[in-house]
Image (spheres, rainbow, N blue to C red):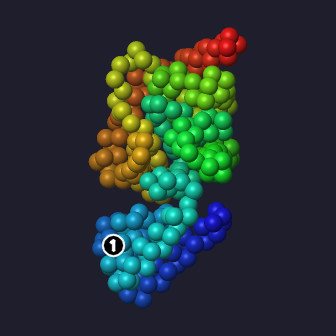
Amino acid sequence: MANGSRQAAWEFFGAELKRRRENAGITQVELGSRVFVSGGYIGQFEQAIRKPQLDVAQRIDEALQTDGIFERMWQQLIKEQRYAEYFAHAADLERLANKLCDWEPSVIPGLLQTPAYTRALVVATHPFASDELIAERVTARGERSGILKDTTRPEYWAIVHESVLRVPVGGPEIAAEALEHMATMARERKVVLQVLPFSAGAPANNGSLRLMEFDDAPPTAYTETSFSGSLLDDPAVVKRASRAYDLLRGAALSPEASLALIASAAEDFRRWTRTT
């Protein structure tokens, strides 16, 4: 399903939700209280601005007594999306955020990757995948990075661990190009980039972390491991995640020192390429 038709399908989901809610004589606030989200979120679901998580779709079915229709629509739409189910909601929110803050302890953040680097990661995690599937994953990740080229692009901060600079993902040439691209994005002021050096010791957060802020909704955090991810919107949890990010930022090198370290690591890979 193309992006446009998928969006149209989510708009149908929202329109159907609004129709059935109004037929039941329930306000957005009342439905929100029954399914444990705010009335504003119900409004955003109805406008297809945000997509509900599966458990919310199930509770909507219960509240409106719709015999599972919203769960079935959700399942069908999620099956046809381009990202893993656990990341799909984060990808949707990424396009709505006015500020993104990424922490990556092992790989270059997705928004800053080159196609060759992304391909190497996909092949490493899906060694038996078809060329078509690999190309689709690479294209999807590349399309995400388009938000940094928009005039309305979000304010973007990224912190990576020094280990990200030392692993030759895809080989030294691909790794060097990837680091140089990341540095170029920082020099073009599309991202404020910092490196947490080995000398900083244990990081304040072990897995990857993303913080997202919005114009008209509360901030959200997203955490991810190799095989799962979680969206966190509980204010207390988001506050703890924000504190962890602040600690990472405080322990990281300055943007200028970070760029120098990245350039040095890229040159190390270049020398490796010339001597092999």
Q: Is residue 254 left or right of residue 25?
A: right
Residue 186, relative to residue 35: is it above or below?
above
Q: Position of residue 246 (x, y in %)?
A: 39, 32
Nearest the viewer among 4 and 76 is: 76
- Residue in view at x 67 percent, y 23 percent: 173
Indicate the position of residue 119 as horizontal and vertical percent values: 62, 39
Q: Is residue 269 left or right of residue 62?
A: right
Left of 17 or right of it: where is 81? Answer: right
- Indicate the quadrant containing the N terminus: top left, top right, bottom left or bottom right: bottom right
User: Residue under circle 1?
Assistant: 59
Residue at the far front in the pictured view: 128
Quadrant housing the C terminus: top right
**Which residue is at the front of the view, 21 or 107?**
107
Q: Amino acid at mark 1?
A: Arg
The quarter holding residue 108 reads top right
Residue under the point 31% across and 67% down: 36
Q: Residue 28 location, x and y as percent?
A: 40, 75
Q: Quadrant of residue 269?
A: top right
Indicate the secondary structure of the residue bearing disc 1. Answer: helix
Q: Position of residue 68 (x, y in %)?
A: 39, 79
Q: For the residue carrying disc 1, how many other residues have a C-alpha within 10 Å: few (<14), some (14-19), or many (20+)?
A: some
- Give the residue displayed 34% in from the left and 30% down from the top: 204
- Residue 217 visible? The answer is yes
